[in-house]
Image: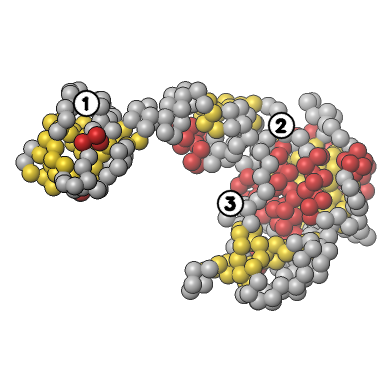
Amino acid sequence: MKTIAQIAAQLQGYDPQALSADGVNAFLAQLVDPVLEVEEVGIFEALGRVLAQDVVSPVSVPPHDNSAMDGYAFDSSQLRTDAPLALEVVGTALAGKAWQGTVRLGQCVKIMTGAIMPAGLDTVVPQEFVTVDGPAIAIPPKLLQPGDNRRLKGEDLHEGTPALRRGERLLPAACGLVASLGLPTVPVWRKLRVAYFSTGDEILSLGQAPREGAVYDSNRYTVFGLLTRLGCEVIDMGVVRDEPALLEAAFTEAASKADAIITSGGVSVGEADYTRAMMKQLGDVEFWRIAMRPGRPMAVGRIASTGPGRAGGAILFGLPGNPVAVMVTFLAFVRPALLQMMGARPEAMPLLKAISAQALRKKPGRTEYQRGIVSRAQDGSLVVQTTGNQGSGVLSSMVQANGLIVLHHAQGNVAAGDAVDVLMFEGAV
């Protein structure tokens, strides 16, 4: 377990008051460690979980050579290029059981999709391509190649080879793959426990009466949604007022229960609250000013814990208070770090290329995340335009957007018609 100072010493050019977005992710990659507790869960409970061990196929998939479609199976050595091939139909092979019989030259077997290929037969002609004449069929010349429309044994997976690798998130296709192997359970890392609370005397919980200068807390609900979609076990601790005793109690309780703590608000320089001081008092914490927009202030580190089995404490992510900045910093930094803690293999979030429908002003030296709406132009290309007002408190713009236009650290102004990177929300939020 590395301290903040140890990690900072290893990163070239580290400056907490002017940290690039790439620098943030590099720092967090060294700060966090994966959980090490394994659970065996059923496939219906496995969606979104992370594999703790390779899944080795106990069988070959498919287990036999079989037909890829409804048609007629035959020996391809009889194929001709100068005339139709006439074959006598001597039986029907159905899916689910092997056809018993012998097929000689000049004969074929009617076969259904998925049915086992009879011995000695290697090619299937689709039924719609043949001419049927009583008990015989005719296959046109130059229609097929040997082996057409046949699935080979082990074509998908060979017995004894890894079907899925440790660290893979079990998405719907992976769950189906596990089921296709006949495995009722899979070994996964336990769910990551994440505690979350909002801070500030100006924050109202739902149900409280409005008052001058106060706003209702939206961050708890967006963060709850982001964590739930990620597959975390969320510990909701509500809104904590800006009082030292209350903050100390909240941080202490969170660190005793959770692997990670997320807060919003109270991390900007000069804010008239006790959150920063309490973070520093209770843990090894660094306060950053990130070269990005929105979401410049952020706190990271560890909060000490006296709870059983929690000697390392909990990882802290202190996010800004503005709603859009909370979501952007979560997607850009917290989400990758939490996935690493969940034991998932590190993977950069895929960026989509789209043509900017408008000119975008951008200063080199910071990363900007602008809310965008991606659509398809008449020529089929993808285009993106901003939602308009990019203020970090305009949460409605995150509803209108379907992705974030990512303007990279060294990038300057963008002209209309230029290609830009877009981080799509689908799959991330």
Reading the image, the residue beneath label 1 is: 99
* For the residues bearing labels 1 and 3, Cβ distance under 8 angstroms: no
Residue 246 x %, y %: 85, 45
Left or right of residue 134, residue 214 in this image: right
Which sits earlier in the primary sequence, circle 2 or circle 3? Answer: 2
The alpha-carbon separation of the residues under discs 1 and 3 comes to 45 Å
Q: Would you identify the image quadrant in which residue 28 lies?
A: top right
Q: Amino acid at mark 3?
A: Gly
Left or right of residue 136, residue 271 in this image: right
- Secondary structure beneath label 1: loop
Q: Residue at x 70, y 46 (%)?
A: 336
Q: Quadrant of the N terminus?
A: top right
Q: Amino acid at mark 2?
A: Val
The residue mark sitting in front, 1 or 2, is: 1
Q: Rate crowding at label 1 as few (under 14), some (14 to 19) or many (20 or more) other CA atoms within 10 Å.
A: some
Q: Amino acid at mark 1?
A: Trp
- Say which of 320 and 14 sits in front: 14
